[in-house]
Amino acid sequence: MSLLELSPALFRSLSAIAVTVALAACTGDAGRLVELADAGSVRGVVKPAGSRESIVNSSPRGTLDSRDLMQRVLVRPRPPKIIAKDFTELPDALTFAQRASTGDSSRVRGARLTEAAQIGLLFGSPEGKAYLAGKDRGRALVRGEPAAACPVLNVAIATTDDEATSGAMRACLNETAARPDCGCRLIARGSHLLAPRDDFAYAIGVGTTVIDNTGGSIMIYASEERMVEGRPGARHIWLLGIDGPAGLLQVEADGRAAMTLNATGARYDGTHKADGFRRGRVARRAYLSGPDGRSMIVLVGYEDTEFKDNRTQLSAWNPYGSPVLKKAEAE
């Protein structure tokens, strides 16, 4: 029986098993590395979570040890909103950030120290792991605001918390400059969480729907997303079936994307668009075509209800067009 033939309820049950089994088995050369032209070199083959190889760039280490997970962070019931919508608001945000995370904040009513391993976004996301691994230095974590429509998450490790905060906020503002409705919010600094606990939710595995736009079939997979070592802003999304990895989607910061399927070795190239965070994971769409003219739509991380309510829009062929073409037209 294929995943396509499973009922939604049965698929969700099997997906959790599939993620666990597939990731445990991915210590070999499962999957195929996607190489995009003119995208720089890739240092080694990046494997799904569960591999012992280093897979996170911009992190002091690719994995966490017990010292990282035993650290504690301060959680407040009503944390301050430290947001900059553009660079003119950055100085005030940095000043506010310094005040909010200094002094005896543990005396704030309702505040409590919580083990870092209990904070999903810190324990699960590549940026969160980099944040935890930087516990002996200055560190900051910044996310696009509002998160549902602004798919930006930046971590910075520096000599001091002030330097890290400035670096992460500036990186975020550079990324949101093309999104007029997005700002940047500081959500963690040092040992302080500066956003509500619910904002640190993180889905361990997410669903990916692959629509054969030419043939009309739909395939559903569990998936695991990781950073691409040596290529900032790029991601590998492993498509995980019950029998293990079924394919690999790679997305680049400049909007390009490529996918390979293990069963056939077929490769599809095109573009992608990130919509925003869903339970700490970025929901994104990819529009891909093969050399034989076959086209695929890949939807990563959308909730079931969101897909059902917006099926026509999400299944439409590439409403964004080519970002490469748009850039050329702008120049």
Image (cartoon, rainbow, N blue to C red):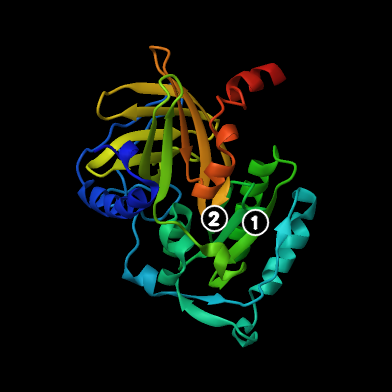
Residue 115 drawn at (x, y percent): 43, 76
Q: Residue furthest top?
A: 292
Mark 2 or mark 1, which has the lower sequence index? 2
Count of numbered badges drawn on the protein: 2
Q: Quadrant of the N terminus?
A: top left
* Residue type at tag 2: Ala
Q: Secondary structure at mark 2?
A: strand
Q: Is residue 125 above or below residue 300?
A: below
* Place of residue 97 in the rendered image (x, y in percent of width and height, measured from the top left): 68, 67
Q: Position of residue 163 (x, y in %)?
A: 61, 59
User: Do the numbered discs 2 and 1 sit on residues whose CB atoms are within 8 Å?
Assistant: yes
Q: Residues within 10 Å of mark 1 (few under 14, many from 20)?
A: many
Q: Is residue 8 left or right of residue 159?
A: left
Asked which quadrant contains residue 63, the reply is bottom left
Between 132 and 10, the one lying in front of the other is 10
- Tag 1: amino acid: Ser
CA distance for labels 2 and 1: 9 Å
Q: Residues within 10 Å of mark 2 (few under 14, many from 20)?
A: many
- Rendered position, 138 above or below 206: below
Q: Which residue is mark 2?
A: 156
- Which numbered disc covers residue 166? 1
Query: In the figure, residue 92 lies in which quadrant?
Result: bottom right
Residue 263 vs 194, above or below: the answer is above
Front residue (pair 59, 296): 296
Q: Is residue 173 visible?
A: yes
